[in-house]
Image (cartoon, helix red, strand yellow):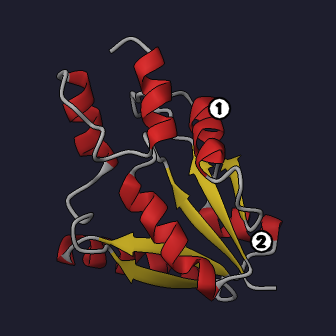
Amino acid sequence: MKIAVFPGSFDPFTLAHQDLVERAMPLFDKIIIAVGYNANKKGMLDHDERVDSISRVFKDVSRVEVHKYKGLTVDFCKQVKARFILRGLRNTNDFEFENAVAQNNLLLNNDVESYFLMSRSGKAHISSSIVRDVWFNGGDISTMVPVSILSLLNEKIR
């Protein structure tokens, strides 16, 4: 079984993230969206809210699972028997960073290969950081996040 882990903080999960998962589905038997924990980031949603909100986006897609994790991504891959890491690239800066991470991941576990997908035109400008900035400053993020994520955020106080 070809299992891919799509790791990130996903705070919040965006339409660009959703697009990447949907486009990667033909490549893998299962995609595990791995929501990492970063104590240093002040976010919009806590760890459990992120897992729950992403699970709602893919509630009808049996081949997509959402898990939370701490520690090294390659260790999580071993735990869930994944041989692939899925990452999205928006621009050349992302490529430089992700390439370095992928090379180091190979040193840590050479059984796990990284797959990169370029962001689709019209979605490359969307990042969780930008969404958070727009949201915290009272802007409209309805064209940047899935409807179920927007509904959850609208329930919260800015």
Residue sitting at x 80%, y 66%: 80
Q: On the picture, is 38 further left or further right than 44?
A: right
Of 104 and 65, which appears nearest the observer? Answer: 65
Relative to 83, does residue 33 appear above or below in the rendering? above
Which of the two labelled residues, at mark 2 and mark 1, occupies the earlier sequence position? 1
Q: Secondary structure at mark 1?
A: helix
Of 53 and 67, which appears nearest the observer? Answer: 53
Q: Quadrant of residue 77?
A: bottom right
> Which amino acid type is marked by label 1?
Asp
Residue sitting at x 81%, y 74%: 81
Query: Which residue in the protein does label 1 denote?
Result: 48
Image coordinates of residue 114 in percent, x first then y, are 53, 83
Q: Secondary structure at mark 2?
A: helix
Q: On the picture, is 84 further left or further right than 3?
A: left
Query: Which residue in the protein does label 2 denote?
Result: 78
> Which amino acid type is marked by label 2?
Lys
